[in-house]
Image (spheres, rainbow, N blue to C red):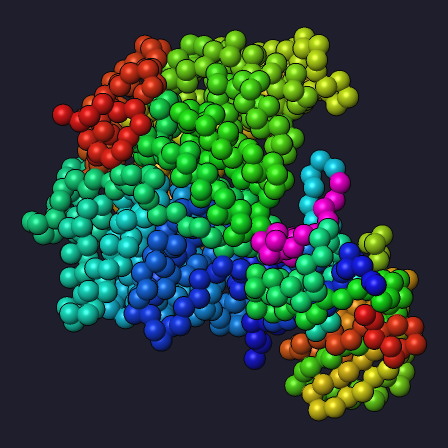
Amino acid sequence: MTNLNTILKQVQKPGRYTGGEFCAVCKEKEKVKERIAFCFPDTYEIGMSNLGVRLLSGALNEIPEVWCERVYAPWPDMEEKMRENGIPLFAHESRDPLTDFDMVAFTLQYELCYSNVLNMLDLAGIPLLAKDRGEEYPIILGGGPCAYNAEPVADFFDLFSIGEGEEALPELARLWLSMKEEGSFTKEEFLHRAAKLPGFYVPSFYAVEYNEDGTIARFVPKYDDIPMKITKRIVKDMDASYFPSEICMPYIETVHDRVVLETGRGCIRGCRFCQACMLFRPVREKSPEVLNRQAKALIANTGYDEITLSSLSISDYSRLDELTDGLLPWTEKKMVSLSLPSLRVDSFTKELMERMATVRMGGITFAPEAGTQRLRDAINKNVEEADLMRACRVAFQGGKSSVKLYFKNTPPTETYEDIAGIADLSEKVVKTYFDTPERNKARGVNVTVSVACFVPKPFTAFQWEAQDDLDVLMQKQMYLAEKITDRKHIRYNWHDAHVSHIEAVFARGSRKLSAALLRAHELGVKFDGWDEYFSYDKWMQAFNETGIDTKFYANRKIGLDEVLPWDLIDCGVTKAFFLRERQKAYESVTTPSCKEGCAGCGANRLGGKTKWCPQSK
Amino acid sequence: MVSAEQVRVKFTKTGSLQFISHLDLMRTVVRLMLRAEIPVAMTEGFNPHPKISFVLPLSVGTQSECEYLDFKITNDIGFSSIIGRMNAQSVPGLTFLHASTPVHKCGEVAFAVYDIVSDEEYDAGALFSQPIVVTKHTKSGKDKETDIRPQIRAWKKEGNTLTVTLAASSADYLNPEYLVTAIGLVNYDIIRKKVLLADGETEFE
């Protein structure tokens, strides 16, 4: 009999599986009443970097009767050893199998993790389909951005948490506890009561009827006391919201191995392709005082020497100066550095860069998203070429010599002229470098152009739009490759269009896709987010064998009056707003940011201490 | 009066920590010392961090009851305070045993004693009575056949535990995994028990 330690000697990076990290939450299992396994369906290194997992498992562990542990997807070498030796998927802290748990939660951060969710359930010995799981199996819960259109995975889950979970998940855990205590617990009754809590969606309670053409006719509720619109949950007061003062410290290097300080949620900008912006509206901010206090505690309790300020658009944080004024005196003394994620070019100033002088970064990242002003207006990226050049000049003057530029290829209305514009803009950045006398001449300029394919996402102005056919996507990528001639200074990266196609299928998919997912799982599909495992051929085989036409989901323009698979969900921002934004995109008309005036997205209906919203009527 | 400036801490690395690599341990200990507010001397330069070094790095998969960590402190807080503070910030398996002024130079390390514990049956007497040829992967990528028997200074087998004294100087180092492979063990634990000087008797301190 081979034991776990023997297996760990045979796999790569065994530190992924050992547990026992400083500040890992361990409770006595005899003393807790409810055990929750919080699963991140990707590697340990990525999962440990996720702020959501830290927040939600922390919030659940605040309840004394609840023990929430972490679970990550084992890398295929480890999975193979586990299957060989009959070791089921286990939780990180206790090493108990997932079948010992009362609830198993998955955070769904991106569509490409769905195959891993199925594989993890399988490795845990838990039947994949909700309907096949009796009372003896844990409740399977989903949440995160993909829960907003969870239809493709609806058949595998018992329920979904819609929106922010810091308050919702403890409420759900308490409902479980109270029903167990009063002896009234059955899975059906629990789900029925959960479906009546704000922000929970129980897919099996809503039957989907289809039209002959495969579009959705209607949702039919199983009970007449459950809502026909599930409104997302938000944290009303960011300052008062739960925030852990400790971090479970990984031994091995993780993706974001540092203190992550969340300055707020939502984004004032409203780029028309961006889903995160809408999912996290209304815009709420934390105060500099609270952030400073949390940062101090985290540095003292972790021993990290870096803090990253996290937000969808950090330079739009309204009190950034006050925050850095508060942080810099003590962080400099402690030799703790501050870092920022990608910046908006229109607010990147010399002052900001000097404040971040201690930042250890090789380069600077900007996201102009499109190559021409017309297209930037159409996608509502309110940034001008002059802003980009000015920001690059500031960076070059400050000694930076490498700049990363993010673009989106093939959004609605894009022409070949717009694509050529990406090459043009990149070459102008190179020229700006040589036109900046104070540049760092020692290293020479290095511009990386990174181009992602447009993927239409639910709850955006572009949710009805078609993604270009796969061959068109690839042809446009090659067109840009031809246009970029200065390969000495410009490096061109593009996303695999095959991956983007699969992503688009699932982003706007319906429950009909679950059959294909099951088949793909049988074919061994996993770790789709990793080049070495993504298999387009296997996916296509799965779709073909289950009668799914991927073009129906990815490459079709959806009728504006169609019932959308995610119509049961209310993200706060209204469909009327998305329709208006869509129209403006076709007219290349921009919408000003929340700061400049309310565009009436509707998210202020949700209430809360918002930063810019007018009071809801 | 010996200055407390230079500190050597003896610690254990047991249990699951055997799977943490040398670099990961380094990062873990640096963060632990920052949390413990040890007044450790920092490196110079753009990215200052506590300047620490491990005397005899351990391979992944080997446990140890005798690891040594060297650093300098800028403020004499006392050896027992260092140990107390560090243990308060530590994790199971990483226990700081004692701190003192270094007696020996790192270069004086010559041997390490390991326990190889396994319930699997094998004839140790036969094994050590002849050359033990193993395949070593060299840095150039070529495999090389080597007899490791000369690198084994002493051995003793009692019950399921084989105790061996292996070469452990910077010029001549034998990873105990080679021996385990030569024996053909599958389920086993390796624990470093002692670090010795050239006489094969005096413990490093």
Magenta stretch in the rendered image: B27-44
Outermost residue, left side: A224
Q: Quadrant of residue A397?
A: top right
Give the residue displayed 34% in from the left and 73% down from the top: A31
Q: Is residue A533 above or below residue A577?
A: below
Of residues A130 and A263, the one drawn nearer to the viewer in this rendering? A263
Q: Position of residue A584 (x, y in %)?
A: 30, 14
* Residue placed furthest toward the front: B1
Judged left or right of residue A593, residue B93 is right
Quadrant placement of the N terminus of chain A: bottom right
Q: Is residue A553 magenta?
A: no
Quarter of the rendering occupied by the C terminus of chain A: top left
Note whether A245 is above or below A267 in the view shown.
below
Give whichever of B139, B143 is nearer the camera: B139
- Where in the figure is residue A47, as x and y percent of width and height? 48, 50
* Residue A156 in sight here: no
In-front residue for pair A205/B34: B34
**Residue A269 sits in which quadrant?**
top left
Q: Which residue corresponds to the image point at 47% horizontal and 11% vertical from the top-left?
A: A384
What is the x, y in percent for residue B97?
68, 71
Q: Would residue A226 be visible to someone looking at this image?
A: yes
* For residue A438, side relative to residue A452 (left or right): right
Could you say where residue A512 lies in the image, as x and y percent from the top left? Answer: 28, 45
How many tags in the picture?
Answer: 0
**Position above or below: B146 against A387:** below
Q: Is residue A169 left or right of residue A253?
A: left
Q: Residue at x 38, y 72 (%)?
A: A29
The residue located at (41%, 68%) in the rendering is A27
Q: Is residue A71 above or below residue A107?
A: below
Residue that lies at the very extreme toward the bottom in this rendered image = B159
